[in-house]
Amino acid sequence: MAEIKSTLDLIMERTKDLVLTEDERKEIRTRERQARVKGWVRRRRDGSLTDDDIRKYLADEGTAASETAALLREECLAHVDPGGDNGRILSLLQTALGMDTAPVEELTAAFHGELERLRIDSDRTARAVLQERGIGGSAVVPNPNLDPEWGRGLERARRRFQERLYRLR
C-alpha cells in the first residue's frame, strides 16, 4: 500500500536543499528587530513598559544594540504627534537613547504657535463673514472646524512639522 504524505511532508521534501543566503538572514533579523522595537514603543505609549525596561531590552540586544537603538529612535520620532501628548516618547528618547529632545519640543511649540495664528485668522475671517450677514455680538463664537481654509492650513502645518521632524533624524 502506498504511503500517504501530508502537505507538510511534501513541502519539507521539496525544500530540504534550500539554504538562506547571508543577506536573507540579515533581512530576517532586521525585520524581527523592527517588529520588536515597534512593540516596545507601542507598549511604552500604553504605559505597560518603562524607559528602564526598554533600556534593559536594548542592553540584551548585544552586538545589535546600536542598530536596534537606531531603529528605536526612528520609531519614536515617527510617533511624535504635534497635537498630542508626547511625554512618554520624549522621555524614552532621553533616558533610553540619551537624545536631546529640545529640538523636538521646539518644533512642537512652533506648531502650536502656528495653529494659534491659523485659529486667529480663521476666527477673524468667520466673524467678517458673519458680520456681512448681519450676525454679530459678543455671544458669537465662530467654529473654525467649519472653515475649509482652517482644515487646509492645519494639514499644511502638520506636513511642515513632519518635514522638519524628518530633518532631525
Image: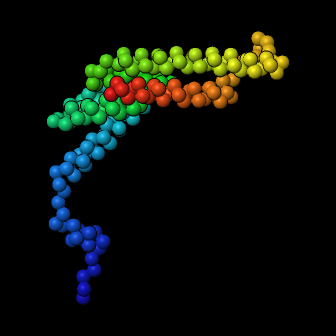
Look at 41% across and 21% down and name the residue there. 87
Residue 47 visible within the image:
no
Residue 58 sits in quarter: top left
Report the residue at 52% width, 15% height from top: 113
Is residue 138 in view from this perspective? yes
**In the displayed structure, does residue 1 sit left or right of residue 89?**
left
Q: Is residue 64 above or below residue 158?
A: below
> How many dots with numbers?
0
Q: Quadrant of residue 147?
A: top right
Q: Position of residue 143 (x, y in %)?
A: 69, 23
Q: Nearer the viewer, residue 93 or 114?
A: 114
Vertical relation: 19 (above or below) 81? below
Viewer-nearest residue: 106 or 53: 106
Tell me residue 163's x, y (percent).
42, 28
Left or right: residue 119 compared with residue 94? right
Residue visible at 25% across and 49% down? 28
Quadrant showing the C terminus: top left
Q: Quadrant of the N terminus?
A: bottom left
Q: Outermost residue, bottom direction?
A: 1
Residue at 26% over, 28% down: 55
